[in-house]
Image (spheres, grey):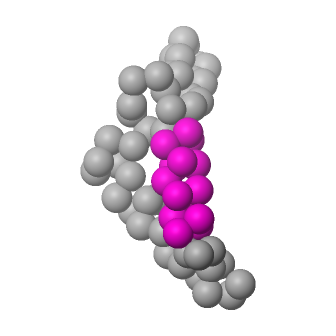
Amino acid sequence: MILIIGVSLVLIGIVLIFGEKIGLGRLPGDIYVQRGNFTFFFPIVSSLLISILLTIILRILRR
């Protein structure tokens, strides 16, 4: 269990560091609205992609 948590934290760190370089957060389908003082950003496609990747990785580790 501790190993899985450690690997997950490492993967999250890698995604945070390299996410901007690979375009994560700026994918088609991510919602970005900017009007005057108001900015709304909801990275729905990026979130789905990260969720799918983590699900696959965790299923592989459980075997």
Q: Is residue 4 above or below residue 21?
A: below
Residue at the far left: name it: 21
Instruction: Point out residue 19 in the picture as x, y percentages from the top left corner.
Output: 38, 52
Q: Is residue 60 above or below residue 1?
A: above
Q: Is residue 51 magenta?
A: yes
Quadrant of the rendering where the N terminus is positioned: bottom right
Is residue 10 left or right of 59 when viewed as pictured?
Answer: left
Quadrant of the rendering where the C terminus is positioned: bottom right
Find residue 2 and report its image quarter.
Answer: bottom right
How many marks the image carries: the answer is 0
Q: Is residue 9 visible?
A: no
Classified by dominant secondary structure, the portion drawn in magenta counts as helix
Q: Is residue 3 above or below residue 36?
A: below
What residue span does the magenta drawing correspond to? 47-60
Find residue 28 and report its image quarter.
Answer: top left
Residue at the far front: name it: 63
Is residue 21 left or right of 60 when viewed as pictured?
Answer: left
Q: Is residue 31 visible?
A: yes
For image coordinates 56% across by 41% down, the residue present is: 47
Residue at the far right: name it: 1
Instruction: Point out residue 30 in the picture as x, y percentages from the top left corner.
Output: 49, 26
For image coordinates 47% across by 22% down, the residue present is: 29
Is residue 2 left or right of 25 when viewed as pictured?
Answer: right
For image coordinates 28% across by 50% down, the residue present is: 21
For image coordinates 58% across by 49% down, the residue present is: 51
Instruction: Point out residue 53 in the picture as x, y percentages from the top left corner.
Output: 49, 53
Residue at the far bottom: name it: 2
Q: Is residue 4 magenta?
A: no
